């Protein structure tokens, strides 16, 4: 055993002495005793430590050295791991760039297609796409071309774009899944991108394509919006027809078009939502999800990937998760919100509780995080017809300070949640979750309004109708997955609500007709009844091209699918624009491959979306003009108001000049015309003539503006900006403006209170006088013809400023003013503020004059805590 001989330092404590066995014969050594050995802790002496356990000291030192070695190894390992991850990231980025460059070089198959078509030569993109899809269909390009020429009329198959559509749609129509399974292959993603390029530019300059085949590449090329909407929405799961335009704008942003790199990145992120795994971060996930992840096979790449907005992407199409405590309740998890830096807070009575928020395809779950861990999750059902979600403001002590929350209700006030999504970067996180929740609520509202009931036996008469509800919910889940993909690649649109289908259509113009077409798409199908019922189809059903005004008619889709009349319970089916759409919704030319895929024409959803987009553009343009006309600041709005009423002010001023006889000739002409109209009994023609003159003036201005004779600035309202001012000046101006408004309201209230006194007999003598005047006026109007009364009124108005009547009018006005000022205002009772939780009722404060000695009115009972009153007039 290793013997330790240590030189102890000055501060080391003395080792304890041990008693000698045998006890009582041991005597203490006196300090002044005889010479003995030096003390064991004397300086510069050797300490042999005979009484210290050498093994324990050795183990302790070994433990210290082991811990230090472990800490050094961990630090070195972390540094190496960080460097390795950095090198792997750089290498992965480099390999991706190289792979992208290699992917851009397309292997062109053997060309068999006839390059010359009716309107020109096929472009190289079109040739490659036609040959590739022909191989996928098990044919050659020339055979597919011949089949298309046999199916389609001449004006259709002579168009190269229609040939590209046919080759692509024929392959896509073979699959009915929520997400096309071929998208997981990079080659198919590249093929779809080439298809969009070919659709956008199907013609080439000549037939000299042999020299370009060897170096054919799509790197650096961009896809336009129309091509993405047409081809991208045809691929299952990539885009919806109703939101494809906004999806393209979100992807492209400020760029000129969609590149191959951006396209593959978007598809790659979208595919992660359909993998049968969670993508999670262990540091922010609850214990329940940790236990679930232990039983789930996860790759290292998925474990490292962390969702940007703490919305963990969950597979919703292949796997449903069940929990013993009914947390998932056989529902598909769509999104989970949980983060330490940006938590989700649930507000209850001015108290915020952090927790984990989970969105499924039916409900919201919230797990409050307490001191002892997460509590039992609370559930809020979103399938109720009366469920709603809207933006909300929250804050401590009831203040509306933070505009980052949503209010979710399941149909009753008692079952309402207020959730705050903490985000220090803005309101986008709240808006995204608002779109998520609104989409689930909107899809069930759509199902309740346009779909059949679950217990309806007619569902079994139409093939595939029982899957309509599941298909609609899957479509909403796809919209949420696409929105999360955009959020992950930081390509969010300014308004996320326009990227989710059902929520957008619920508020869009003409959106109800688009929802009708979606209902026909989801629940329509071939009949499964006997042949006898099928023979009666002509008498009770109609094609979309026939008159749809009959209330006993069923609806046919473009592929012959039937949507029963008994399912049309929504009031929107009876609208005029709905009837006009279904009357003219037939496919007049083109090749129908499925409900959603029509070559050289549009499906029902696409046709409805064309009208919806046109009306949306008009609404957006109108809203843009309103926003541009809305200016800030009280002085600027006052100036704008003055500018707008300037024509009426000028008209009023000119009429006053006529009354004052400033131009006697003009006043005489006006009176001559007025009395002629009165005594010739032409009063009934005045109002129609005024409307006719107004219409003719508007049409004349319209014609002059179309001719360009009014100038570009005609019709614009011009005001001068306010001079620059600091904060103090703005506060003073605001105070003065509020004082003016208060003064105006006070005078108005006083006038109304006096009128209340008159009508309610607050002063009986004044009420009697006013009643007599009204009775005399009514008698005059009953006895004297109206034209004479009107003539007398005009005579009175135009002679008030003349010399012989000026003093008389002045005396009469003074009399009326004195009588008005003598009228008392009605009494006003001001009730003190009462808290709903208090049972004590405070006495009212009255504005009535009190008798002397009773100064102790309700002022004594003023609530000093609140000091707030409600006015009850």
Image (cartoon, grey):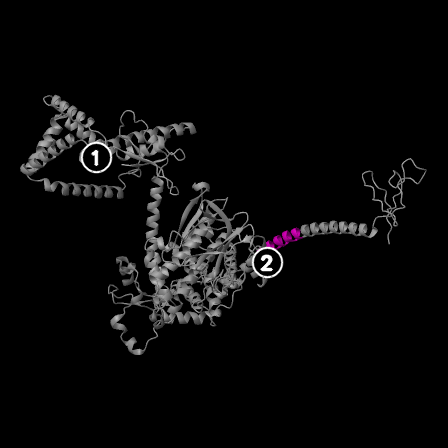
Q: Residues within 10 Å of mark 2 (few under 14, many from 20)?
A: few
Closer-to-camera residue (126/625)? 625
Looking at the image, which residue sits at the far front? 24
Closer to the camera: disc 2 or disc 1? 1
Quadrant housing residue 452: bottom left
Answer with left or right where residue 466 lies relative to residue 805.
right
Percent x, y of residue 140? 47, 71
- Magenta residue span: 81-96
Q: Which of the image's four quarters has the C terminus?
A: top left
Closer-to-camera residue (110/653)? 653
Instruction: Evaluate whether residue 479 shows in this view.
Output: yes
Q: Which residue is mark 1?
A: 756
Closer-to-camera residue (4/95)? 4
Residue 745 colored magenta? no
Q: Which mark, residue 248?
A: none
- Mark 2 touches mark 1? (CB < 8 Å): no
Quadrant housing residue 293: bottom right
Answer with left or right where residue 798 lies relative to residue 421.
left
* SS label for mark 1: helix
Residue 85 colored magenta? yes
Q: Which residue is mark 2?
A: 301
Percent x, y of residue 847? 28, 31
Percent x, y of residue 108? 52, 65
Percent x, y of residue 484? 48, 55
Instruction: Evaluate whether residue 204 shows in this view.
Output: no
The secondary structure that dominates the magenta segment is: helix
Q: CA distance from mark 2 to mark 1?
A: 78 Å
Looking at the image, which residue sits at the far left? 783
Q: Residues within 10 Å of mark 1 (few under 14, many from 20)?
A: some
**Disc nearer the start of the sequence (2/1):** 2
């Amino acid at each position: 055993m290793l013997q330790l001989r240590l030189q102890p330092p000055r501060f080391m404590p003395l080792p304890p002495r041990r008693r000698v066995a045998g006890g009582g014969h041991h005597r203490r050594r006196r300090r002044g005793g005889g010479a003995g050995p030096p003390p064991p802790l004397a300086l510069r002496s050797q300490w042999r430590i005979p009484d210290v356990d050498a093994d324990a000291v050795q183990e302790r030192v070994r433990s210290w050295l082991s811990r230090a070695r472990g800490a050094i190894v961990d630090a070195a390992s972390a540094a190496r791991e960080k460097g390795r991850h950095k090198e792997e990231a750089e290498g992965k980025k480099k390999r991706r760039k190289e792979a992208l460059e290699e992917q851009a070089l397309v292997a062109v198959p053997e060309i068999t297609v006839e390059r010359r078509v009716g309107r020109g030569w096929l472009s190289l993109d079109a040739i490659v796409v036609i040959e590739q899809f022909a191989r996928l269909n098990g044919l050659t390009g020339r055979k597919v071309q011949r089949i298309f020429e046999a199916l389609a009329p001449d004006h259709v198959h002579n168009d190269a774009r229609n040939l590209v559509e046919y080759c692509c749609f024929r392959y896509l129509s073979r699959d009915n899944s929520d997400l096309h399974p071929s998208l997981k292959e990079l080659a198919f993603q590249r093929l779809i991108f080439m298809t969009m390029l070919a659709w956008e530019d199907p013609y080439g300059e000549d037939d000299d394509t042999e020299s370009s085949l060897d170096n054919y590449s799509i790197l650096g090329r961009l896809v336009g919006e129309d091509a993405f909407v047409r081809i991208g929405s045809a691929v299952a799961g990539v885009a919806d027809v109703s939101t494809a335009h906004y999806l393209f704008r979100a992807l492209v942003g400020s760029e000129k078009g969609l590149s191959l790199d951006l396209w593959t990145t978007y598809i790659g992120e979208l595919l992660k939502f359909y993998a049968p795994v969670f993508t999670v971060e262990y540091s922010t996930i609850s214990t329940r999800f940790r236990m679930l992840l232990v039983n789930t096979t996860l790759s290292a790449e998925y474990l490292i990937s962390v969702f940007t907005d703490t919305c963990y992407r969950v597979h919703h199409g292949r796997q449903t998760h069940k929990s013993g405590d009914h947390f998932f309740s056989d529902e598909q998890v769509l999104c989970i919100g949980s983060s330490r830096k940006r938590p989700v807070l649930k507000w209850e009575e001015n108290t915020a509780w952090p927790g984990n928020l989970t969105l499924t395809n039916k409900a919201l779950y919230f797990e409050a995080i307490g001191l002892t861990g997460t509590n039992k999750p609370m559930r809020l059902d979103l399938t109720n017809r009366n469920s709603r979600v809207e933006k909300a403001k929250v804050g401590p002590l009831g203040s509306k300070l933070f505009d980052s929350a949503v209010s979710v209700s399941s149909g009753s006030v008692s079952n309402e949640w207020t959730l705050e999504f903490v985000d220090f970067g803005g309101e986008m996180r709240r808006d995204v979750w608002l779109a998520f929740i609104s989409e689930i609520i909107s899809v069930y509202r759509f199902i309740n309004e346009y779909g059949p009931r679950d217990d309806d036996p007619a569902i079994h008469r139409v093939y595939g109708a029982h899957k309509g509800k599941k298909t609609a919910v899957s479509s909403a889940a796809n919209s949420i997955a696409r929105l999360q993909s955009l959020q992950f690649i930081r390509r969010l649109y300014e308004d996320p609500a326009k990227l989710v289908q059902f929520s957008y259509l619920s508020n869009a113009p003409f959106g109800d007709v688009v929802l009708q077409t979606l209902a026909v798409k989801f629940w329509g199908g071939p009949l499964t009844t006997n042949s006898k019922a099928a023979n009666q189809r002509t008498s009770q059903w109609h094609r979309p091209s026939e008159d749809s005004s009959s209330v006993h008619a069923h609806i046919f889709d473009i592929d012959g699918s039937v949507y029963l009349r008994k399912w049309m319970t929504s009031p929107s089916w009876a609208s005029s624009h709905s009837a006009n759409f279904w009357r003219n919704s037939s496919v007049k030319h083109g090749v129908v491959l499925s409900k959603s895929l029509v070559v050289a024409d549009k499906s029902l959803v696409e046709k409805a979306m064309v009208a919806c987009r046109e009306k949306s553009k008009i609404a957006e343009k109108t809203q843009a003009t309103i926003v541009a006309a809305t200016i800030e600041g009280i002085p600027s709005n006052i100036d704008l108001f003055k500018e707008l009423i300037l024509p009426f002010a000028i008209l009023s001023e000119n009429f006053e000049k006529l009354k004052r006889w400033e131009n006697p000739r003009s006043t005489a002409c006006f009176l001559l015309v007025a009395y002629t109209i009165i005594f010739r009994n032409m009063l009934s023609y005045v109002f129609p003539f005024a409307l006719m003159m107004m219409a003719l003036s508007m049409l004349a201005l319209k014609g002059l503006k179309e001719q360009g004779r009014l100038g570009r600035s005609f019709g614009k309202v011009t005001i001068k900006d306010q001079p620059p001012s600091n904060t103090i000046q703005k506060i003073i101006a605001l105070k003065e403006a509020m004082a003016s408004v208060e003064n105006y309201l006070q005078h108005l209230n006083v006038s109304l209170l006096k009128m209340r006194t008159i009508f309610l007999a607050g002063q009986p003598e004044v009420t009697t006088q006013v009643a007599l005047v009204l009775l005399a006026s009514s008698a005059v109007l009953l006895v004297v013809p109206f034209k004479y009364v009107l003539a007398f009124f005009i005579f009175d108005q135009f002679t008030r400023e003349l010399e012989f009547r000026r003093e008389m009018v002045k005396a009469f006005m003074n009399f009326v003013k004195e009588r008005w000022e003598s009228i008392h205002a009605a009494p006003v009772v001001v009730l003190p503020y009462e808290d709903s939780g208090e049972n004590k009722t405070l006495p009212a404060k009255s504005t009535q004059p009190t008798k002397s000695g009773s100064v102790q009115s309700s002022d004594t009972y003023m609530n000093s805590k609140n000091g707030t009153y409600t006015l009850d007039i």
